[in-house]
Image: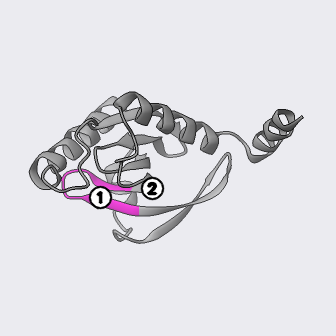
Amino acid sequence: MENHVSNLVRRFTQIGDEHIRELPIYHRPLEVEAVDFQPWATGWIGVLITPWFMNVMLLPRDKDQWQSLAVGQKQMQQLPSGEQEFVVGGDAELGPYLFRSLASPMLGFSSQIDARQAAQAALRRLMVPHADVEQTATCVRR
C-alpha cells in the first residue's frame, strides 16, 4: 500500500508543480498529502489533499484491475455509509483510480492542519455504517 500511496502523492505533486501552480485555484498554504489510507475491498481508500482539490480516493491493489474502465466514467461503490458515486480517473503513470470530490478549490482552508482535519472527518463519515451515523445523530440531538 505504501508504494501506491507514495506514487499518488509524488504524481500529484508533479502535476501541481508542472501544470497547476500558477493558476488561481492553487492555494499555496497547502501541499499534497495522502490522509488515512487503509485497506478496503480490492484496494485502498483514503483522502488526497492537494492545493487545488480534496478527493476521497480508491486505489486498486493491482493496476490492471480497472484497465477496462474509461476515465470520466461513473462507478457506484458500496461503503459502510451506503452506496457512493465515484468517477474513474487515472493517467499513464498511476493507472486507473476512483475518486469522489470533497472540495475544490481549496481556498477555504487556512492551513494544512485544517484540510487534514476535514479529510479525516469526511473519511470517518464514509466509513461508518449508516445506522451508526443515525444513532450518533440521535444521541447528539438529545
Q: Amino acid at mark 2?
A: Ser
Q: Residue at x 42, y 56 (%)?
A: 98
Give the main secondary structure of the magenta stretch. strand
The image shows residue 19 at horizontal and vertical percentages of: 13, 55
Residue at the spot 56% in from the left edge and 36% down from the top edge: 121
Q: Position of residue 83 (x, y in %)?
A: 65, 58
Three-letter code for the amino acid on which mark 1 is drawn: Gly
Image quadrant where one finds the C terminus: top right
> Which residues make up the magenta segment?
88-97
Q: Earlier in the sequence, mark 1 or mark 2?
A: 1
- For the residue pair 113 and 12, the one nearer the viewer reads as 113
Q: Quadrant of the N terminus?
A: top left
Residue 101 is labelled as 2
Q: Who is closer to the viewer here, 39 or 128?
A: 128
- Left/right of residue 70 with respect to residue 79 in the rendered view: left
SS type, badge 1: strand
Q: Is residue 38 above or below residue 96?
A: above
Q: Residue furthest left?
A: 18
